Image (tube, rainbow, N blue to C red):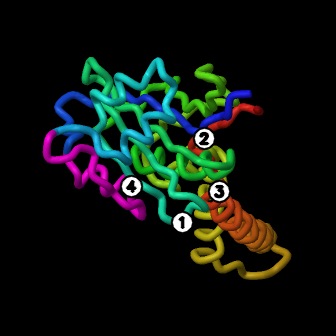
Amino acid sequence: MPAPTYLRTICTVPIAPGADVHDMALWSRIFAGWRFQAVRDETGQLTEAVERATKLVWHGDADEVRRGALIYAVWPQANQRLPALVNLTDDRQFVTVRVFASHLTEGQRLTEQLVVRMLRERAFTFVPGVRVALAITVGEVRTDLTSGQVSVQRGSVLSGFYRQNKYLLNVTLAVLLITLSVVLLITPEGNYTPLGKFYGLSERVLSAVLLNFLLLISQFLFFARHHNVIAWDAP
């Protein structure tokens, strides 16, 4: 029975007009923590390490990968020295990023980290519908185990949390400002006057809103840790 090659994730992303994908500073930001290795030797031929990596690529894509090989990097903390391989497509309009891994969760985790950093870069155009495939090859037959759609919303974690909870945050902030203004600016003459009752009600509402803000902070911390930039389908 043919032995399967390593799992790998595959993501093809359009290049923005005018972007220089040969800029190593760009890839250093994306592959922070990875170790870069030479793609070609002095004669312009692919290095042995890159040739070994291309042998893990499905044979239908291998020639294009060889022609457009751009970046070869190794994640040093993996159980094995498994690489990431970036190539330009033949039309020079797209880059394809492949991340090899021994375990499904490892491949997904490393890929999500790279995609998050690529989303911050203006060199790439993440249009709606960009997907990441997780595949394996057995006997020269590629099988997609699962795939996921990339969330193309750019911006910080804070802006992402705001977009997801816009209505709740706006209402909570409005109520907070109103009740806080009442508590700070109004001095009732007595507890049982209409103004005093309104003041007391405002104090209780303010306490509830402040408690709600604490809950929102905990939700934000959870969102910052666990939000997924790739919505993976069930395998």
Q: Are marks 4 and 1 in contact (CB under 8 Å)?
A: no
* Tag in front: 3 or 2: 2
Q: Is residue 43 above or below residue 222?
A: above
Mark 3 to mark 2: distance in Å? Answer: 31 Å
Query: Comparing marks 1 and 3, which lies closer to the viewer?
Result: 1
Which residue carries the number 2 mark? 6
Mark 2: few, some, or many residues within 10 Å (few <14, many ≥20)? some
Q: Which mark is residue 228?
A: none
Label 1 packing within 10 angstroms: few (<14), some (14-19), many (20+): few
Amino acid, disc 4:
Phe
**Which residue is under mark 4?**
31
Query: On the rendered image, what quadrant is the N terminus found in?
Result: top right
Q: Which callout, 4 or 2, points to the residue nearer the camera?
A: 2
What is the secondary structure assignment of the residue under circle 3? helix
- Assess disc 3: are there few (<14), some (14-19) or many (≥20) residues with their C-alpha within 10 Å of its C-alpha: some
Q: Earlier in the sequence, mark 1 or mark 2?
A: 2
* Between discs 1 and 3, the one toward the N terminus: 1
Q: Is residue 32 visible in this depiction of the protein?
A: yes
Residue numbers of the magenta segment: 23-43
Q: CA distance from mark 4 to mark 2?
A: 20 Å
Rounded to the nearest angstrom, the CA distance separating label 1 from label 2 is: 17 Å
**Marks 1 and 2: CB-CB under 8 Å?**
no
Residue 83 appears at what percent x and percent y?
46, 49
Residue 129, given in percent of the width and then of the height, sits at 52, 23
Q: Nearer the viewer, residue 137 or 150?
A: 137
Vertical side of 58 occupied by 77: above or below? below
Q: Amino acid at mark 2?
A: Tyr
Residue under label 3? 223
Q: Which residue is mark 1?
A: 77
